[in-house]
Image (cartoon, grey):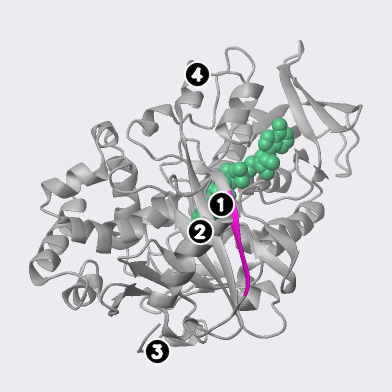
Amino acid sequence: MSSDRTGRPGAAAAVVVGGGLAGITAALTLADSGVRVTLVEGRPRLGGAAFSFQRDGACGDLTVDNGQHVFLRCCTAYQWFLDRIGASDLVTLQERLDVPVLDAGTGRLGRLRRQSLPVPLHLAASLTGYPHLNPVERVRAGRAALALRGLDPEDPALDDTTLADWLRGQGQSRRAVEALWDLIGIATLNATAEEASLGLAAMVFKTGLLSHPGAADIGWARVPLGELHDGKARAALDAAGVRTVLRGRVGEVRPAPDGRWQVGLHTGPGAEEQLDTDAVVLAVPHREAHGLLPDGALEDPAALLKIGTAPILNIHVVYDRPVLRRPFFAALSSPVQWVFDRTEHSGLTGGGQYLALSQSAAHEEIDEPVSALRARYLPELERLLSPARGAGVRDFFVTRERTATFAPAPGVGRLRPPARTRAPGLYLAGAWTATGWPATMEGAVRSGLSAAREALSRLGRPVHPDHGQSALESHERPPSGHRPDPDTTPAPLRRAGGEANEEGAA
Ligand SMILES: Cc1cc2nc3c(=O)[nH]c(=O)nc-3n(C[C@H](O)[C@H](O)[C@H](O)COP(=O)(O)OP(=O)(O)OC[C@H]3O[C@@H](n4cnc5c(N)ncnc54)[C@H](O)[C@@H]3O)c2cc1C
């Protein structure tokens, strides 16, 4: 058996394969319940699909996130995770949902924001004044939102159709789809309404917009993602006694004759290690999981290969002066989707402003040359932001995540497996497993909690009381605790500040 640093000789052992949010969560949950855990990650860092890197480019040393990541107030498991790794103070959460929406064609700025009213009235005023829809479209959008309340995201029939088909049935115009449903749906599902399963879309819209007034308030990290998901997570794992093996690529997971498991990993050229363990959590992407699963572990392992993937492109532009006054905005009538100010997070020196454009479901553009993207997006930013017109561009680069998320296409619900496999002691985690959520940080954390709970049950260990039962169950209810909603929390307990949401041009 491998050495460990936990000082718990004789305790049950578990190996977690994959150091993304799912794997980190599973490892922490198991370790906190007294299991000796080894976490094996193939890359030299933790954080998986949500990470940062250093760029030594035209602006000197810049810390770059591979893609802007946001969460919503209803993402209770991810917020629990932030608490667990001691990073809650490193994120911002809007006091009230407020999304500036700028139409490049008309130059008009609209706002999707909530009022301090119960669901569904919390969004009614915003919809009534939303300038990007005509009055008929606004009324029909309101009716469709109410009809959403009658959908059951877990009804398998919803997974057979697209969000677009349902929206057409609800009388939604193309403009309403673009200016409202896709505006939110593309960013949260990584798919257009034409591509998205109605089941997953109903889950997102019901949970985010209709479960609780504050559910869709937007949060984001104030520091690079790597500081949270690598730095803070690594420190929490170390403190919990987890042995973390970086640059350790697992090549084989096989059952041992004694009912335990053997995990074979490469840790360098010619360097192999074998871990003997009681339980294994496979927290790797679905195609890698398919390659590692032993025979018989799933009834239909080929189903994993039918789960598609969807790309996200990020376009990074450093201007020589400030061009945007807000932390972010969404664009209409433009190839630009969402734009975030990254200046503070990146450590930019020498003045100016760093913007990141987050382009989801970017199937058409993901392989386009930088020159073509530059020729398209710089003029678009000038159309959207008047100060960009005379500004110099200090740096322009792109990050491409070709398999950013699983594709939330119709039928995907039947393909996503639960945490428990048919092989006792072997569990699956990852945003792609059957969490009910689209591919999000929330889904990843939920999957890690579920897999660890299954493993603990097999190992005869109680789940540590702090470990996520409430996080797993509470997204339907007003979240409580450390991240108070101003509409449900007495004033003295509220977080100070909140984001400034001044009127005027973006
Ligand atoms: C550009 C981009 C933007 C996104 N934006 C958002 C957002 O705004 N909000 C949001 O909630 N979500 C967002 N997501 C999705 C979110 O990042 C993912 O859903 C989540 O991080 C997935 O976590 P995971 O642990 O399931 O998988 P992963 O992060 O993929 O982790 C799997 C890990 O397994 C490791 N691994 C694979 N094979 C092996 C092996 N054989 N041996 C050892 N290790 C192995 C990999 O190196 C990886 O670290 C975004 C994703 C991307 C790429």
Of circles 4 and 2, which is in front?
Answer: 2
Residue 119 versus residue 503: which sits nearer the camera?
A: 503
For image coordinates 80% across by 35% down, the residue present is 11
Give above or below for 325 relative to 153: below
Q: How far separated are the C-alphas under marks 4 and 1?
A: 34 Å
Q: Which mark is residue 306?
A: none
Q: Which SS class for mark 1?
A: loop
* Residue 213, horizontal then vertical, whole percent: 31, 69
Task: Indicate the amino acid at tag 3.
Answer: Glu
Residue ID for mark 2: 373
Give above or below for 484 relative to 277: below
Q: Which SS class for mark 3?
A: loop
Residue 137 versus residue 8: which sits nearer the camera?
A: 137
Q: Residues within 10 Å of mark 2 (few under 14, many from 20)?
A: some
* Residue 36, horizontal then vertical, whole percent: 79, 39
Give above or below for 337 relative to 24: below
Of callouts 3 and 1, which one flags the residue occurring earlier in the amino acid sequence? 1
Of circles 3 and 2, which is in front?
Answer: 2
Residue ID for mark 4: 302
The residue positioned farthest toward the left in the image shown: 136
Of circles 3 and 1, which is in front?
Answer: 1
Task: Indicate the amino acid at tag 1.
Answer: Pro
Task: Indicate the amino acid at tag 4.
Answer: Ala
Is 5 left or right of 224, judged from the image as shown? right
